[in-house]
Amino acid sequence: MSAKKTVRGSRFDQVFGLCNVTMLILIVIAMMYPLYYTIIASFSDPYRVLRGEVLVAIRGFTLDSYNYLFQEKLIWSGYLNSIFITATGTVYALAVTIPCAYALSRKLVKGRMVIMTYFVITMYFSGGMIPSYVLIKQLGLIDSTWSLILPAAFSAYNMIITRTFYQSTIPDEFYEAAKIDGASEFQIFFRIALPLSTAIMAVIALYVAVGHWNSYFSALIYINTPGKYPLQLVLRAILIMNQQIQSLDVSSISDSEELADLMRRQMISQTMKYSLVIVASLPMLMFYPFIQKYFVKGVMIGGLKG
């Protein structure tokens, strides 16, 4: 009797496992297909994309959308600006967040719960867009790249995650042993805390870097010079220009060559939106695999307890 139950149980487990694997495969396909379609559509002929022929493979391979895209001079300056903003903003955010979280994780710091309460309040209440603009203007940062870096340097959420990491990962005995050996607080921080916080630093770096790379609204408010636009704002301008091209009336054009060129531009503008997604996403997709193992470890450890 027990043998029959074991057989039935094993069969049930096999069927259940097979259903789980099948469901997970379908979910992965549903999540990955939009990105896959974006890639193949960006390299396919615009006419075939609009006719719905591009579903599982590239049809009529062409680089026209990328050629038109990279003919825009602002693309290159936008890339350089975004790289500078992302790199500088990430390093500055780590330099601000890590020491603050470490200090608030130490029980010997008096009034740390009051300071934590102050930081948490800022997560729910802010001055708003107009007071922020007035502050940036009074600081003389309008039309400056630093207006995109300095205000976004500190995040209470990132600080809380980092503080939780220090509290749940590094035992107090490490600090006590270092104190007995005569180490100062700065030596404890730089020689013990920092070397052991590689995982959470990778997590915070990824959060901040992705936020800076994808941000465009702050630049839309504070930056006036096109040469200082980050990449996302440049791509937004190109997308708006393509929409204007699509809305042009071709019936008013009499010259055949000009008409053919305009119609070609209208067709390419339909697929250029896919190349815009690839250009905007590729750097972060290339950056993520290098810190994936640290990212997973940091998220798991940082979420153990608050």
Image: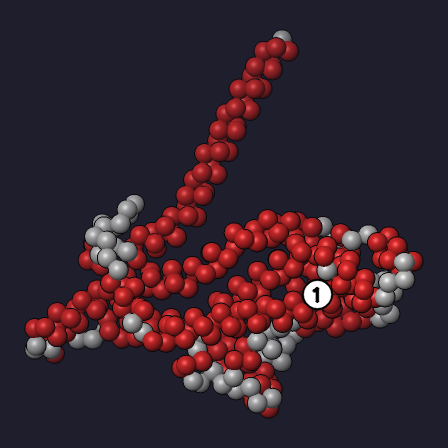
Would residue 249 be found to the left or right of residue 182 on screen? left
Give 12 or 82, whichever is nearer the viewer.
82
Residue 183: image quadrant is: bottom right
Residue 1: image quadrant is: top right
- Name the residue type under label 1: Ile
Give 214 or 114, whichever is nearer the viewer.
214
Residue at 64 percent of width and 49 percent of height? 297
Q: Is residue 220 above or below residue 49?
A: below
How far from the left and from the top, in percent, is residue 205? 60, 62
How far from the left and from the top, in percent, is residue 195? 72, 57
Residue at 52 percent of width and 29 percent of height? 17
Would residue 81 be found to the left or right of residue 58 on screen? right
Residue 270 seen in the current view: no
- Residue at the limit of the structure toward the right, as seen here: 180
How far from the left and from the top, in percent, is residue 28? 45, 43
- Residue at the limit of the structure toward the top, as seen here: 1
Give 40 or 243, whichever is nearer the viewer.
40
For the C terminus, the image quarter is: bottom right
- The number of numbered badges drawn on the structure is 1
Would residue 217 be found to the left or right of residue 60 on screen? right
Residue 55 seen in the current view: yes
Q: Is residue 125 above or below residue 64?
A: below
Residue at 62 percent of width and 80 percent of height? 127
* Residue bearing mark 1: 98
How far from the left and from the top, in percent, is residue 95? 67, 69
